[in-house]
Image (cartoon, rainbow, N blue to C red):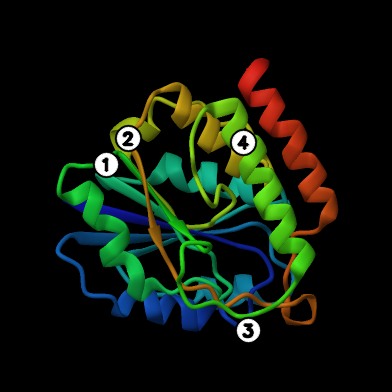
Amino acid sequence: MKLSIIIPVYNEKATIREILRRVQAVKLPVRKEIIIVDDCSRDGTREILAGIKDRNVRVLFHDANQGKGAALRTGFARANGDIVLVQDADLEYDPNEYPQLLAPILDGRADVVYGSRFMGGTHRVLFFWHYVGNRVLTVLSNIVSNLNLTDMETCYKVISSKLLRKIRLRSQRFGIEPEITIKLAKLRARIYEVPISYSGRDYAEGKKIGWKDGLAAIFHILRYRFFD
């Protein structure tokens, strides 16, 4: 078995070295490859990535900024693993939790595993309205997909490659989260959730998603359920 870890990156000069170190340090019962997709960073991240010399790390570069969804689609297309895992580059999510994320797939129970920030894991206390927005979007996604997820917007999505190849993804930006979820639901995938910790950051620390992305997510939920 082989795990492909996809890391979309945009302007993460302060954290990219550390997240790569943490991902490389994780001990797993499967082989792993790391695919980093730089979405045309302008803060020096590209120069750092260009200097990486590791046969287990592939770095891909976009010539123009296209969004997280586009970066993930690029990474998914180049993944060679039996399982694909999405990892953000901002240190909000802890790679040491990979073993519990992989367990339901490795033991044959699941096709997909989501890491939920709302199932009791340790988390940093931050924005109330972000919490409300995440819960509203998850409920709306559940209504149209007939799932009972607690955290649709989570970064940590682990998917069998065989299943992922059956999905044609279109989203350029953060709409990739509801798109993946709704299309997995349409395929009747066996989806599990596990609790994860969450060390959220604020906007001064580089957080990018905002209220406009929340409104766009509502559109994407309806779009991919009824019109795609």
Q: Residue at x 54, y 55 (%)?
A: 154
How many C-alpha atoms fall within 10 Å of the one at disc 4: few (<14), some, or many (≥20)? many
Q: Check the image and report above or below for 172 versus 49.
A: above
Give the side of residue 98 with respect to residue 58, left or right.
left
Tell me how far mark 3 sits from mark 2, CA to CA: 37 Å
Image spot of residue 130 (x, y percent): 74, 62
The numbered mark, 1 or 3, whose residue comes first in the sequence reads 3
Q: Which residue is situated farthest in the right direction here? A: 212
Q: Report x, y in % for residue 200.
A: 62, 75
Residue indicated by mark 3: 14
Give the CA separation, mark 4 to mark 1.
20 Å
Task: Name the mark nearer the viewer: 1 or 3.
Answer: 1
Side of 175 where 183 appears, left or right = left
How far is disc 3 from disc 4 in space, using C-alphas? Answer: 33 Å
Three-letter amino acid code at the position of disc 4: Ser
Disc marking residue 110: 1
Label 4 SS? helix
The circle drawn on residue 141 is 4
- Compared to residue 86, the image places residue 11 above or below, namely below
In the picture, the disc for residue 207 is none
Asked if residue 50 shows in the view, the reply is yes
Which numbered disc flags the more N-terminal residue, 3 or 2? 3
Residue 91: percent from the left, percent from the top? 54, 77
Q: Find residue 190 and name its label.
A: 2
Residue type marked 2: Arg
Q: Looking at numbered disc 1 in the image, what kind of residue is underneath it?
A: Ala
The residue type indicated by label 3 comes to Ala
- Could you tell me which residue is drawn at 22 percent across and 74 percent down? 27
Q: Earlier in the sequence, mark 3 or mark 4?
A: 3
Discs 1, 2 touching: Cβ within 8 Å: yes
At horizontal 52% and vertical 50% (from top left) the residue drawn is 150
